[in-house]
Amino acid sequence: MRLRSLLFVPGDRPDRMEKALGAGADALILDLEDAVAAEKKPGARSAVAEFLAAHRQANLWVRINPLGPEADRDLEAVLAAGPQGLVLPKAEGGGCVNELARRLTEGGAAAAQILAIATETPAAIFQLGTYGGAKRLAGLTWGAEDLPAAIGASTSREPDGRYTPPYELARSLCLFGAAAAGVPAIETVYPAFRDIEGLAAYAARGRRDGFTGMMAIHPAQVEVINRAFTPSEAEIVHARGVVAAFEANPAAGALSLEGKMIDRPHLVQAQRTLAAAFD
């Protein structure tokens, strides 16, 4: 399943859900957590369930509330409508994912997958190596908004927008945790949705570092994100050349290509590039 761009839509705004279908995102995340005030959550659950039922062919995910009574109400409302997956906020390790997977099975959601937001509490940081083997896990993502509040920090960013060291650490551990678990790592949102140039640079950095997709908060961000996480023609041509070189020399540990030495890690990178291009 291709997940370059995942666009958040407030669960209490069905008008925005309809518009978001045309934004070109690989997936929509219908949000029942932070985007919806407490008093509006019952109505939002009904709106999300109705939208899911009306668009069963679309790649629709639901961000539920953290595991607890509110999440139970979310699941009761939406599972029968068949979401592609659930986004689990404030996840604290593979055990949380397995618990949600158990509830999905009990609720009859045989195919629904789970995307865990894995860095939103202090305890979560120490669990990023525990996601290997977690049931139904489709990927890990991270966030830089809840964690500062949880530890008493005033911000997660420098004046120029770069993350401060604690949040660069959280980002890195999410990336490594996803790789260790064998699932995609999804980059977090870029809040300044009107800053398209900054978004392009941010998304490019994410792909460079190993993230395979990114979450969006506004439809205007989707095209930029899709472009950033889609290999260029030049990258595809180079990757095909690397693969062809090793296919022609299967016993070689290192080869020369275009005047540079390549070895097995380059082959792995080339295979991933081609998989990303043609998934």
Image (cartoon, grey):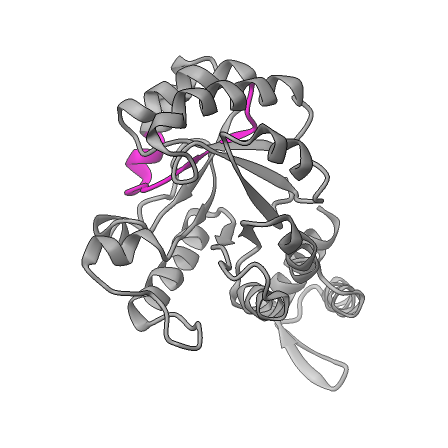
Question: Hey, which quadrant is residue 54 in on the image?
Answer: top right
Does the magenta segment cover residue 91? yes
Q: Can you say whether 38 is above or below 115 in the image?
A: above
Question: Hey, which quadrant is residue 262 in on the image?
Answer: bottom right
Magenta stretch bounds: 82-98
**Whether residue 109 can be seen here:** no
Drawn side of residue 189 relative to residue 239, left or right: left
What's the residue at 37%, 75% (across, down)?
158
Drawn side of residue 148 relative to residue 238, left or right: left
**Quadrant (top left, top right, bottom left, bottom right) of the N terminus:** top right
What's the residue at 65%, 39% (across, down)?
20
**Whether residue 49 can be seen here:** yes
Q: Please state which of residues 99 and 202 is positioned toward the viewer in this rendering.
A: 202
Q: Can you say whether 61 is above or below 219 in the image?
A: above
What's the residue at 59%, 38% (across, down)?
28
Drawn side of residue 63 relative to residue 151, left or right: right
Which residue is farthest front?
Answer: 39
What's the residue at 31%, 51% (across, down)?
146
Q: Please state which of residues 246 and 65 is positioned toward the viewer in this rendering.
A: 65
Q: Can you say whether 178 is above or below 10 in the image?
A: below
Q: Position of residue 7 (x, y in %)?
A: 58, 44
Does the magenta segment cover residue 276? no
Q: Position of residue 24 (x, y in %)?
A: 71, 44
Which residue is farthest bottom?
Answer: 259
Question: Hey, which quadrant is residue 74 in on the image?
Answer: top left
Q: Please state which of residues 122 and 193 is positioned toward the viewer in this rendering.
A: 193
Q: Position of residue 153 (x, y in %)?
A: 23, 63
